[in-house]
């Protein structure tokens, strides 16, 4: 059965690959991005997100079966948090009315291996409390300290996003509306954004030190697209709140074989 999807970040990278794969399967895709899509939009602002959700819903005739949020950047600036966190969460919230008109609505977002890296606790909490003004203030202060501190805008955005997905997935708004909500965290994906960095031995070594991938090494965007498509398909009826690390074994390498004993009796 064909479905109607809204895909953000649809003009490049994982988003473009996901949109193309959905169209290959005969589905209708409404792309959202800065340009070269059905809904040109700036997801870095509240107005841009609200307008994008409204226009995408209208193009879909008021009923959307799946939303896949891929839009994001990795620059060491405050805008990264605005796009990666609020640009996903507020857009998804804006799409809820159209999703609820579907018989089998689904939603999935792209998180990152960076969700396991050191975040700024203050920045994460600003996001989860919905305080974008504070997030921009904190993120700007970090960026002014240089690229290393500025990168916390990225890791914090992905940590906050995975936590938001986990929290909201079981809420009345999502689970109560029978909408599975999940995230995918890629390892190192070969896209135009990473090709230049991975082209040099030094760049590849730096990436591999933080994201070790013993299974099949660096991955194509299609490996993430296929998982996003399954998560937003009719087949996914009960998976909720998960950040699935589709990462060539990076998560297992970094966190080891025991992520359960934190709750064991001491």
Image (tube, helix red, strand yellow):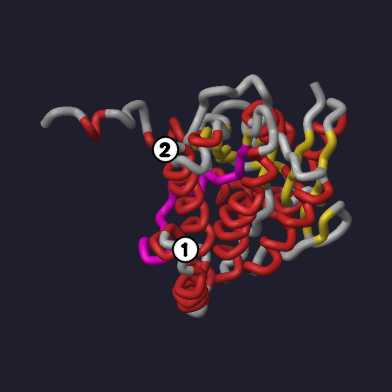
The residue pinned by badge 1 equals 130
Whether pointer 1 and pointer 2 mark residues with C-beta atoms closer than 8 Å, the reply is no
Q: Nearer the viewer, mark 1 or mark 2?
A: 1
For residue 213, say whether it is visible.
no
Local secondary structure at mark 2: helix
Is disc 2 surrounded by few (<14), some (14 to 19) or many (20+) residues within 10 Å? few
- Residue 116, position in %: x, y? 44, 46
The answer to whether residue 216 is left or right of residue 134 is right
- Residue 262, position in %: x, y? 24, 34
Examine the structure image and report whether residue 111 is included in the region drawn in magenta: yes
Q: Earlier in the sequence, mark 1 or mark 2?
A: 1
The answer to whether residue 8 is left or right of residue 35 is left
Viewer-proximal residue among 152 and 198: 152
In the rendered structure, find residue 254 and report the number of the disc placed on it. Answer: 2
* Residue lying at 55% horizontally and 57% vertically, measured from the top left: 85
The answer to whether residue 227 is left or right of residue 147 is right
Examine the structure image and report whether residue 91 is included in the region drawn in magenta: no
Local secondary structure at mark 1: loop
Viewer-proximal residue among 175 and 265: 175
- Residue 208, position in %: x, y? 55, 43
- Residue 95, position in %: x, y? 66, 49
CA gap between label 1 and label 2 equals: 30 Å
């Amino acid at each position: 059965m064909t479905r109607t999807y809204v895909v953000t970040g649809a003009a490049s990278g994982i988003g473009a690959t996901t949109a193309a794969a959905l169209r290959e399967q005969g589905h209708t895709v409404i792309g959202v991005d800065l340009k070269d899509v059905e809904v040109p939009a700036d997801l870095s602002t509240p107005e841009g997100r609200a307008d994008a959700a409204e226009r995408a819903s209208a193009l879909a005739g008021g009923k959307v079966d799946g939303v896949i949020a891929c839009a994001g950047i990795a620059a060491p600036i405050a805008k990264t948090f605005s796009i990666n966190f609020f640009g996903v969460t507020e857009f998804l919230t804006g799409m809820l009315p159209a999703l609820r008109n579907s018989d089998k609505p689904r939603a999935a977002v792209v998180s990152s291996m960076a969700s396991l890296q050191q975040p700024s606790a203050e920045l994460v909490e600003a996001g989860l409390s919905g305080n974008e003004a504070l997030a921009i203030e904190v993120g700007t202060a970090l960026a002014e300290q240089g690229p290393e501190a500025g990168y916390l805008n990225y890791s914090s955005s992905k940590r906050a996003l995975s936590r938001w997905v986990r929290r909201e997935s079981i809420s009345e708004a999502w689970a109560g509306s029978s909408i599975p909500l999940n995230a995918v965290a890629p390892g190192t994906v070969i896209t135009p954004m990473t090709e230049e960095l991975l082209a040099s031995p030094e760049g590849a070594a730096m990436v591999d030190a933080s994201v070790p991938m013993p299974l099949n090494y660096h991955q194509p965007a299609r490996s993430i697209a296929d998982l996003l498509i399954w998560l937003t398909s009719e087949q996914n009826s009960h998976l909720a709140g998960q950040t699935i690390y589709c990462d060539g074994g990076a998560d297992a390498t970094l966190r080891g074989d025991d992520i359960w004993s934190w709750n064991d009796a001491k």
